[in-house]
Image (cartoon, rainbow, N blue to C red):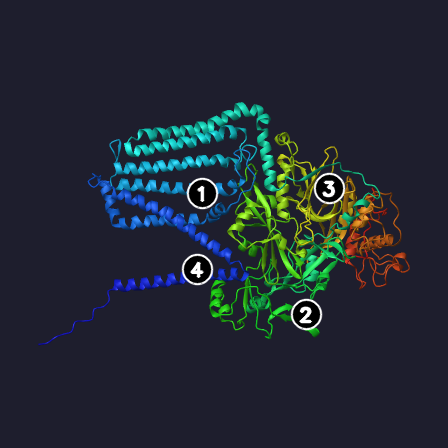
């Protein structure tokens, strides 16, 4: 008997593919899960290192809870109505052939659909609910404000915290019921509970009850929503104001009340239909509800407005306009503004500024938006350093005196490393910037450069004398990440600065702080290698047990992650506090739900020539407070949040949500208090509202015959002029204070505004210098309402006068000769001498190649008079009768480019040029004639080179032997000086006699008032 063994049975191909597919799916899921975990874990490490883990855990828990609530609130009702509609289907229903085909398709997928559809809708609802976690938590942690609205008498906390939550709940519930109603209809139709045919609609009793109850619940929700809409009218814009006017209070709100009650009645009719089976009454009720909505919601308000309000608008609307005035002023913090009628003096007399000498002493002639290239050329040292532009402004106490300064940090610019930009260099070697540069805002050198109070590498100046920490690991331009730290005694690998001891080329250092999460173990290195997609983090031998990784280093980004509820100011600024460089960032709490407050676009309000229009998640706001001041340490990145406005209800609510994250402002050190200031963006928002809301009574608001606007920047007519910080004294102040100011001109339609001043606003920005004590006047808004009978030129008109004045334009043209470019600085406005003084520094730089803006002239204006001189001191003296009485920061400076004449903007009698000036002009003209080929095409007798005076002349004897007019120190023709001379020759004509007075312009026919032009001092 022969037996044979059965062949081995191979695994079926389908089973093999299934195993492989499942394995790949599991691997893919694990990879995705690990990436998600790596992202969450790296976030945890970052927040833990800063001591703000409660912020992260609160967000995680809140989002998870809201997702679960949203998922269940949608999925459970949807699952329930599907199950109910299916189980209560008629068993022996006669279906059409089309429905039979539908059931054949649906039936194999029925079990999957009955579970999959609720899960599908549940996930969408869960994600939508999780996005509303802040609204829910604010409602749960909201506080009372003790301020009530004028319409319903409710606490404004209801509008800030309660109303947004109730609106979200009603919207979510309505969506759930609507989905349930639609799915009930679909399932009932598929399984015969609802049949359509032969001009009739047949609904089974079970389906009728289910549909009618759902419809009734939906109408109840709509009734509640209409009731809530009554309160929402207080934060919605109407025709002229935000909030209900006469029509809103007497027609719209009562109409919404009627509609809400009607919706409840119709809902009850649907509930009755569920049991008695008569659809006529709820359907008639629904139709009547729609008609009522049209009549009550549109027709009646139109009739009231047309026949009652329009003919008597001021009489009927006055109380509502006043509500809007009061609500808007309270919401924007402009209700305590101190206004003063100001009759501006427009005549300038000698000694007029003597009483304002302290204000003029700090007038800033170094424009932080212009001198950035100068600071870079003088203080950059290496290409891998950079300074932010525009520079920041601050003030310090030096030798017992407050000094306004222009400051900036020397930060890294690894984009300039070129071929040296390896991973090791960008991540391990070039890790930080070095030092702060500070210049006096009111001073200049003889060459027109800034006077540095702190400079150089290593640093020299008053800050270095305080032994401050100059290293900048956290700044606005820091690299994406750096890995720092090492064991004690190890050789440092970080470049500290490019100067070494004993003639060395560099100094190295090792980070000694606690600035970032540890990457001292393999697991953390793997996590961050994945986060930054850089395998070098995992495999580099330079990392050690003490290594830290620094990232998210921009000060604004750090604060935003730790306080996501804040809207941050667009202008963080660095300052040296208690021996450390600190970034100071102002944070705002905002809302769009303050009753009777007009909204404003935050992005448009703060956009100006220094700040392009940003974007915000909540742009249209009608409430703002500077509730938090934050600091970021530039060395270790530590963040401190201080509750600056601890009475703000929004901040109180957020403190309940994130306990222990915000410190009381009394913890701020005295040194820090002396450097905080009134925030720029808040001032911009307030001035935007004050254009309309500077009036106090409803009649003025109704007439709007005195609307103001912010003037455009004369240097950028497409953008608003920014507010400026200055140490100044308002007419009603006893002493100067660090302040911020802006001005107003009349508003108009179509851009045809008169550019004359109508108002001047200053806010006291000095918080004091004592810990635990705010200076009483900090944040005080002071407004000068300029008398309409006095015409005070606005910034645009003053700039136009500067540009069109023949004496000024002549000198500007001379400054532009050759490869020179003239830059007009910020046009500052100062209330001094009983009027308003304008000051504008004028800089000159090369139009190509290396650019080094240097201060060359100062323009000033008072009333209708202007002056254009080498220094501010000279310009003020020229403007005010030879002796202004003012103190300035440049009064002891003799500019190196100043000629022998006094210059000046006043017109004087022409005189014949003499001495050095005449010799310079004559030789320049002769040189140009020789170069152009004069009548005899020969060099003038006694002149060795074009542009050099004959030996023995006054011009020759008055100058050093190594330099002459039109020459540099190497006795070569100076192209800049020749360019100036060429400009003069063009003005005078060939061989025309030149005339000059005290700054008189040169012209063959009409003498113009200009300033002496420095030929021999051109660099």
**Circle 2 is placed at which residue position?**
499
Q: CA distance from mark 2 to mark 4?
A: 45 Å
Closer to us: 301 or 610: 301
Earlier along the polypeptide chain: callout 3 or callout 1? 1
Where residue 255 appears, as percent x and y from the top left, is 46, 29
Which mark is nearer the camera, 3 or 1? 1
Earlier along the polypeptide chain: callout 3 or callout 4? 4
State the residue at coordinates (45%, 41%). 166
Where residue 689 appears, as percent x and y from the top left, is 62, 39
Where residue 743 sits, quadrant-wise, is top right
Q: In the drawing, does residue 920 fall left or right of residue 647?
A: right
Earlier along the polypeptide chain: callout 2 or callout 4? 4
**Circle 1 is placed at which residue position?**
168
Quarter of the image for the C terminus: give it: bottom right
Q: CA distance from mark 4 to mark 1?
A: 30 Å
**Circle 3 is placed at which residue position?**
798
Residue 950 is at least partly visible in this image: no
**Circle 4 is placed at which residue position?**
36
Earlier along the polypeptide chain: callout 2 or callout 1? 1
- Above or below residue 583? Residue 249 is above
Quarter of the image for the N terminus: give it: bottom left
């Amino acid at each position: 008997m022969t037996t044979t063994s059965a062949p081995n049975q191979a695994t079926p191909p389908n089973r093999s593919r299934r195993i492989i597919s499942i394995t790949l799916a599991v691997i893919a899921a694990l990879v995705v899960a690990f990436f998600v975990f790596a992202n969450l874990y790296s976030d945890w490490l970052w927040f833990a290192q800063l001591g703000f883990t409660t912020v992260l855990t609160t967000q995680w828990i809140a989002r998870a809870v809201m997702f679960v609530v949203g998922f269940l609130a949608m999925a459970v009702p949807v699952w329930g109505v599907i199950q109910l509609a299916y189980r209560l289907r008629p068993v022996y229903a006669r279906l059409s052939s089309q429905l039979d085909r539908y059931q054949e398709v649906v039936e194999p997928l029925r079990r999957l659909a009955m579970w999959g559809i609720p899960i599908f809708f549940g996930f969408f609802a869960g994600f939508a609910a999780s996005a509303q976690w802040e609204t829910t938590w604010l409602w749960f942690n909201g506080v009372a404000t003790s301020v009530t609205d004028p319409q319903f008498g409710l606490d404004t906390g209801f509008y800030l915290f309660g109303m947004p939550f109730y609106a979200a709940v009603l919207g979510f519930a309505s969506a759930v019921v609507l989905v349930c109603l639609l799915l009930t209809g679909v399932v009932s139709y598929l399984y015969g509970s609802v049949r359509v045919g032969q001009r009739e609609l047949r609904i089974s009793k079970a389906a009728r009850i289910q549909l009618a109850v759902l419809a009734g619940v939906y109408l109840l929700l709509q009734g509640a929503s209409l009731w809530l809409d009554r309160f929402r009218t207080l934060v919605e814009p109407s025709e002229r104001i935000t909030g209900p006017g006469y029509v809103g209070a007497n027609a719209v709100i009562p109409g919404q009340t009627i509609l809400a009650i009607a919706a409840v009645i119709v809902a009850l009719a649907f509930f009755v239909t569920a049991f008695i089976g008569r659809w006529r009454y709820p359907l008639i009720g629904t139709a009547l509800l729609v008609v009522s909505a049209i009549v009550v919601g549109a027709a009646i308000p139109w009739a009231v407005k047309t026949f009652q309000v329009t003919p008597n608008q001021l009489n009927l609307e006055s109380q509502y306009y006043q509500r809007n005035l009061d609500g808007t002023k309270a919401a924007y913090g402009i209700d305590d503004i101190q206004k003063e009628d100001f009759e501006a003096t427009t005549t300038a007399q000698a000694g007029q500024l003597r009483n304002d000498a302290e204000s003029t002493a700090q007038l800033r002639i170094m424009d932080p938006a212009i001198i950035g290239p100068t600071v870079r050329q003088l203080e950059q040292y290496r290409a891998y350093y950079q300074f932010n532009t525009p520079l920041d402004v601050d003030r310090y106490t030096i030798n017992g005196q407050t000094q306004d300064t222009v400051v900036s940090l020397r930060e890294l610019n690894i984009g300039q490393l070129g071929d040296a930009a390896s991973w090791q260099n960008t991540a391990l070697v070039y890790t930080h910037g070095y030092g702060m540069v500070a210049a006096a805002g009111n001073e200049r050198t003889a060459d027109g450069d800034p006077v540095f109070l702190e400079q150089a590498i290593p640093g020299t100046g008053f800050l270095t004398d305080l032994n401050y920490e100059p290293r900048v690991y956290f700044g606005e331009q820091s690299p994406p990440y750096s890995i720092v730290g090492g064991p004690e005694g190890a050789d440092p690998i970080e470049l500290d600065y490019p100067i070494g001891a004993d003639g060395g080329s560099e100094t190295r250092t090792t980070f000694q702080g606690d600035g970032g999460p540890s990457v001292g173990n393999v697991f953390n290195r793997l996590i961050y290698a994945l986060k930054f997609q850089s395998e070098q983090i995992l495999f580099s031998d330079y990392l050690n047990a003490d290594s830290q990784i620094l990232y998210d280093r921009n000060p604004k980004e750090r604060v935003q992650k730790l306080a996501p509820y804040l809207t941050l100011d667009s202008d963080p600024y660095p300052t040296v506090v208690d021996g450390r460089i600190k970034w100071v960032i102002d944070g705002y709490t905002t809302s769009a739900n303050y009753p009777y407050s007009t909204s404003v676009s935050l992005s448009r309000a703060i956009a100006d020539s220094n700040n392009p229009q940003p974007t915000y998640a909540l742009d249209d706001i009608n409430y703002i407070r500077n509730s938090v001041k934050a600091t970021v340490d530039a060395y270790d990145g530590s963040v401190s949040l201080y509750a600056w406005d601890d009475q703000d209800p929004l901040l109180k609510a957020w403190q309940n949500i994130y306990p222990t994250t915000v410190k009381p402002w009394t913890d701020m050190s005295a040194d820090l208090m002396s450097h905080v200031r009134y925030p720029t963006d808040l001032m911009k928002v307030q001035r935007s509202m004050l254009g309309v809301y500077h009036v106090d009574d409803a009649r003025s608001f109704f007439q709007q015959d005195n609307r103001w606007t912010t003037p455009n920047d004369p240097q950028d007519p497409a953008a608003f002029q920014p507010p400026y910080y200055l140490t100044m004294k308002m007419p009603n102040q006893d002493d100067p204070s660090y302040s911020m100011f802006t001005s107003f001109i009349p508003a108009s339609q179509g851009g045809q505004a008169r550019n004359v001043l109508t108002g001047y606003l200053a806010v006291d920005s000095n918080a004091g210098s004592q810990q635990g004590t705010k200076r009483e006047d900090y944040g005080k808004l002071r407004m000068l309402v300029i008398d309409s009978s006095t015409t005070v030129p606005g910034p645009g008109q003053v700039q136009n006068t500067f540009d069109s004045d023949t004496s000024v334009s002549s000198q500007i043209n001379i400054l532009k000769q050759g490869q020179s470019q003239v830059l007009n600085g910020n046009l500052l406005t100062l209330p001094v001498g009983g009027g308003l003084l304008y000051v504008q520094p004028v800089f000159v730089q090369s139009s190509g190649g290396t650019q080094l803006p240097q201060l060359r002239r100062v323009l000033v204006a008072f009333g209708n008079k202007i002056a254009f001189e080498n220094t501010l001191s000279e310009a003020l003296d020229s403007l005010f009768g030879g002796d202004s009485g003012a103190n300035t920061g440049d009064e002891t400076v003799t500019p190196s480019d100043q000629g022998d004449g006094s210059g000046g903007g006043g017109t004087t009698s022409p005189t014949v040029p003499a001495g050095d000036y005449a010799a310079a002009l004559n030789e320049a003209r002769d040189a140009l004639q020789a170069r152009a080929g004069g009548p005899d095409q020969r060099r003038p007798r006694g002149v060795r080179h074009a542009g050099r005076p004959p030996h023995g002349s006054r011009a020759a004897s008055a100058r050093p032997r190594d330099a002459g007019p039109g020459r540099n120190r190497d006795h070569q023709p100076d192209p800049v000086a020749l360019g100036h001379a060429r400009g003069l020759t063009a003005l005078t004509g060939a061989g025309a006699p030149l005339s000059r007075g005290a700054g008189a312009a040169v012209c063959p026919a009409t003498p113009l008032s200009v300033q002496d032009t420095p030929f021999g001092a051109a660099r």
